[in-house]
Amino acid sequence: MKGMILAAGLGTRMGPISRYMAKPAVPFLGVPMIERSVEVLMRAGIEEIIVNTHHLPETVHAVLGDGSHKGIKISYSHEDPILGTGGGIGKVRTFFGEETFVVINSDVLIGIDARQAIESHKRSGAVTTLALRPDPENRYGKVLLDADGIIRQIEGSPAELADVPADWRADLMFAGLHVIEPRWFDFAPPREVYDSVRDVYSAMIAAGEKINGFVFQGRWIDIGSARRLLDATSRLLPEQGGNIIPDPGAVEGSAAERCVLHEGVRVGRNCRLRDVVFLGEADVGENCNLDSSIVCPGARIRRDSSVSEAIIAGNEVFKLSDLRD
C-alpha cells in the first residue's frame, strides 16, 4: 500500500519561522513534524510515500531525503501554484495506481494506529474512510456520523441537513488521515485546484456514496501555528524529562525550565530560560531572560535582553500576539 503526506502549505501561521523552513520541517520536541507523519504510515505497513511540497521544498527534502535511512521509499510532487488538499492528491493520481492508499496531514500530532483505520475501511466497503476524533467544543469543523458509522455531513456540507437524529454523533471532527479507494477521483472536479472536503467529500455525500468514519481516542494536537507549537511543547515536555538539551554544557551557569535546545545553541552565563524552543543554532548573550518564546536558526540575542511571548528571528523580535493562530 502507498501513502501521501500533504506538506505544501505556506506556513503563514508560523510567522517568521517560515522564512527558514517549510512548516512540516519545523521540529517538535526535537523531531521534524513530517517525520512523525512518516512514522504513522510506516507503522501501518506502508512502504512507499509521496510528499507534495511548495514553500522551501529543500527543507523538507533535507529532512526526509529518499527515505532510505528510514527503510522506506519517498518521492516528491512539487506544486507551483498550490493545488489545494484535493488537487494535490489529484496531481499524483498515477502514483497510486488502482490500489487503496492513505493520505495524512503533516502539521498535526496524531496518536492513531492507521492499521486499524485501514481495517475499518476494508470492512466498510466505503469509497473513503476518514479518521475522526471527539471535538465537543466544535473548534475544527463538525462531522455528523450516523448510527452505522457513515459520515452524513462534514464541515457543513451538504448544508440541507437540519435535524440530526438522536442516535447520530455530532461531537466529532476530521483528524487529518484518509484511507482512499481510486474511485475517489471520480468525484473530483475537472480542474487542477480543489479542496478534498468542500469539493470531493461534499460531492460524494450528495451522490449518496458511503464515507466511513473511524473514530479513535488517541492524542491529537494541532501544531500548525507558532503559538500552538509552544503550547504543545510545554504540555508534552514533562514526558521527555522536562527539557531536551542535546549538550548540557550549552546551558552551564544558566537555568533552563521546559526548554528544547538544538545542537549548536550557545547560552551565556546567568541566563534564565523558561518555555523556550530553539529551532537551530543560536547564540544567547549573558544575563538574558527568555520566556515563552521561539528562537529561529541563526538568531543572535544580545546580552541583558529580556524577551517574552515572542519569536526571535535574526536580530528581530516578533510578538506572538501579532500572529494569526
Image (spheres, helix red, strand yellow):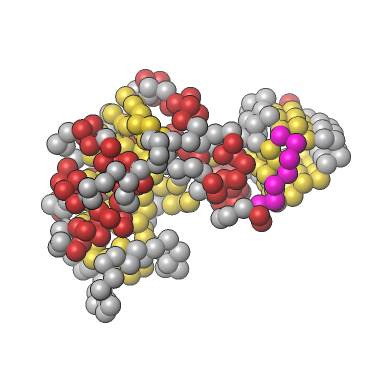
- In the image, farthest residue toward the top: 68
Q: Which residues make up the magenta segment?
A: 314-320
User: Residue 268, image x and y in percent?
Assistant: 81, 31
Which residue is pictured at 19% across the width and 40% down the height?
100
> Residue 96 lies in what quarter of the image?
top left
**Does any portion of residue 244 appear in the rendered image?**
no
Residue 72 horizontal side relative to residue 7, left or right: left
Which residue is pictured at 81% across the width and 45% down the height?
306
User: Residue 298, image x and y in percent?
Assistant: 68, 29
> Residue 325 lies in what quarter of the image?
bottom right
Q: Is residue 220 above or below residue 8?
A: below
Total tally of numbered discs in the picture: 0
Q: Is residue 97 above or below residue 311?
A: above
Q: Is residue 261 above or below residue 84?
A: above
Which residue is pictured at 26% across the width and 46% down the height?
191
Say if the magenta span includes residue 144.
no
> Residue 94 lies in what quarter of the image?
top left
User: Residue 265, image x and y in percent?
Assistant: 70, 28
Residue 102 horizontal side relative to residue 60, left or right: left
**Does any portion of residue 58 appear in the rendered image?**
yes
| Front residue of this view, candidates 302 and 27 | 302
User: Residue 130, image x and y in percent?
Assistant: 28, 53
Which residue is pictured at 54% across the width and 34% down the height?
21
Image quarter in which the N terminus is found: top left
